[in-house]
Every structure is written in C-alpha cells, then in structure tokens.
Amino acid sequence: MVAYAFSWLSLVITFILAATLEMLSLPDMLNSFRPEWLVLTLVYWLLRYPERVGMAAAVVAGLVMDVMAGSYFGIHMLAMSVISYLVLAMQQRLKMFPVVQQSIVVFFIVGIELMVVYSLRSALSVVDSGLDYLWQALASAMFWPVILVLYDRLVFALR
C-alpha cells in the first residue's frame, strides 16, 4: 500500500483561495477575461488525488459557486459534476501530458463547464451574450501553469 502525501489543510486553503478570487471584483472591461478559479482548483485536485477528491467535491464546489453567483440553485453543481466526470475519465492520460497540452485540455474542460452553465441559464430565461464565455476559458487555460506551480508548492509545504 502506497502512502499518499495528502493534506486536507492544503485542499481547504486552495478552495478558499479560489472562492475568494471568484468573488474579487474586476473592471467591466476585464470581467470577460476572468479565469474560473474554482474549476481550475477542482481540476487540479482531481488530477493529483482522484481517490480522495471526486464527485462529492465537485458537488460542493458547484453549490458554493451557485451561492456566490446568486444563480439558480444547481446549475454550477451540474456543470462541475460533468467536468469532474470528464477529468476523472481521462485522468491517467491527462497527468502524463506536458503542461502546454494540459492547458489546451483545460481550455476545453472550462469551455464545457461554461457552456453548460450558460445554456442552462439561457434556458431559464437569463439572456447571455453569444460566445463571450470562451474568453474566460482561454484565460483559465493561460493560468493553468501558474495554478500547477503554486498549488504544488503549497501541497509540498503543508504535508
């Protein structure tokens, strides 16, 4: 049996940091380039420790996003569950990709999450503008290497 260096404290710190960054207000010009911090954090933990962090963490993170965004209850939860399933299904391959290739996959994963959220919101009569959410997915993909380095250092420091 392999002993995993897993710290629940680092998990909680990273999710609190991501939730704080999600609530940070940006100017209107930069608002469409806001990375999806909670999604990036969830993807990080699903890649590093899939046996400890799974669908339950996705449901909790989705509910937290629903409360923070003030949206319909369960929209982000469904979207986070979908991307959690996708990441867990390809976790073995995704871990072995170089960081640039992981960023491309993260772009698609965040794009799928945002597409689910925006399509459900538009079905529930909240009109959103076109494909502007793809800028958020691109910004998230650009921040993925930074997330990897920072969270790896935090996990190493707290174990």
Image (cartoon, rainbow, N blue to C red):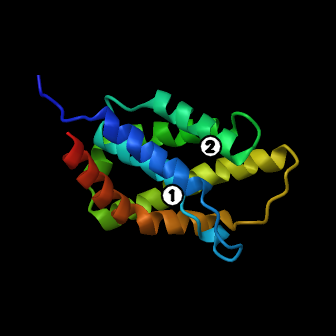
Please determine whether, in this image, residue 111 is positioned above or below residue 132: above
Work out whether 5 lies above or below 102: above
**148 sits left or right of 63 in the view:** left
Q: Badge 2 local density, few (<14 within 10 Å), some, or many (20+)?
A: many
Image quadrant in which you'd find residue 158 = top left
> Residue pushed farthest top?
1
Q: Residue furthest left?
A: 1
Residue 19 position in % (x across, y down): 54, 48
Residue 111: image quadrant is bottom right
Q: SS at mark 2?
A: helix
Residue highlighted by disc 1: 108
Numbered tag placed on residue 92 in the rendering: none
Q: Position of residue 97 (x, y in %)?
A: 27, 57
Which amino acid, by three-letter code, is at mark 2?
A: Met
Q: Position of residue 84 (x, y in %)?
A: 48, 39
* Residue 30 spot, x, y in % from top left: 63, 74
Quarter of the picture containing the N terminus is top left
Could you tell me which residue is drawn at 32 percent across and 33 percent down?
8
Left or right side of 121 for 136: left
| Residue 65: mark in rendering | 2
Report how far apart the C-alphas of labels 1 and 2 lie in the structure: 20 Å
Residue drawn at the location 83% of the way across and 45% of the way down: 123
Q: Residue at x 13, y 28 (%)?
A: 3
